[in-house]
Image (tube, rainbow, N blue to C red):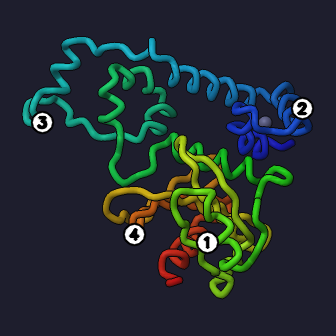
Amino acid sequence: MTCDESRLLLHAYLDDELDAAQSVDMERHVAACPACAAAQREHERLRKALTQPELYRRAPEALRRQWEAPPAVAATPRRRRPLALAAAAGFAGALLLSAPTWLWLARPGAAPAALVDEAISGHLRSLQPQHLMDVVSTDQHTVKPWFEGKLDFAPRVKELAGEGFPLAGGRLDAIGGRSVAALVYRRRMHAINLYQWPADGADTPQSIAQRHGYTVIDWRQGGMRFLAVSDLNEGELKQFALAFDNTAH
Ligand SMILES: [Zn+2]
């Protein structure tokens, strides 16, 4: 296993989602590679920190007053900051001061870091043998009806072979605690997972997140939330998302 592979599989490893052989490979690599061992420890530490309610402390009064002061008086205007960035920069402890901080951190319109992580984990899981598809078909008229009765909504299924992204099939998956449709498209040897589920609210433009060599594109359109995940390069995944959005069916 190379360092790149080890970093790609790290989240799946920590989620206990690798098969036995991959887990052994991972443990062997980490035992021999101080850099990956450090990365693993850091991820474990962060994950633990982010799930322990006792770490959420009330901010000192002076700091709270500074936050609550009108912008004209505040010494430094506070910017909303994506959680992952803050955590990576080592500011997690400083930012996780009180429960309302979570709300304050939420950036409207962009996929929360947890959702991006979950989408990538789901994508990795889907690439395990036998996990990718429950219905294997390049025909939308086969894939779409397959979801009937399995979900409380009808997913949008489009054939994009003409755009260079042939439909391969679909399966049920779970994101953010709800059942979602996952459509699988192909581009050369790459798989694209397109997750979708109903979401209230106005359409949002496509926003892109990059993590561990994966690209996630998130958007809302016509009452549906879409998350496209792949190890394809950003340009091609963007092309896919636009093709899906712009193709009528
Ligand atoms: Zn390594």
Identify the residue at image location x=36%, y=54%.
Answer: 109
Disc 4 and disc 2 in contact, CB within 8 angstroms: no
Of the four image quadrants, the one with ligand 1 is top right
Identify the residue at image location x=14%, y=30%.
Answer: 74
Q: Position of residue 236 (x, y in %)?
A: 61, 72
Which structural element holds mark 4? loop
Q: Quadrant of residue 191?
A: bottom right
Of the image marks 3 and 4, the number of the one nearer the N terminus? 3
Does 66 sit above or below residue 15? above
Q: Residue furthest front?
A: 149
Q: CA distance from mark 4 to mark 2?
A: 45 Å
92 or 177, nearer to the observer: 177
Identify the residue at image location x=21%, y=19%.
Answer: 64
Disc 1 and disc 3 in contact, CB within 8 angstroms: no
Asked if residue 25 lies left or right of residue 57, the reply is right
Can you say which quadrant of the picture contains the N terminus?
top right
Q: Position of residue 184 (x, y in %)?
A: 69, 65
Q: What is the crowding at mark 2: few (fewer than 14 residues within 10 Å), some, or many (at least 20)?
A: few
Say if disc 4 is inside 8 Å of ligand 1.
Answer: no
Which numbered disc, 1 or 3, marks the residue closer to the eye? Answer: 1
Which structural element holds mark 3? loop
The residue to which callout 1 is attached is 236
Of the image marks 2 and 3, the number of the one nearer the N terminus? 2
The tag on residue 71 is 3
The residue to which callout 2 is attached is 24
Asked if residue 198 lies left or right of residue 228, the reply is left
Q: CA distance from mark 4 to mark 1?
A: 23 Å
What amino acid is labelled 4 in the image? Gly
The tag on residue 222 is 4
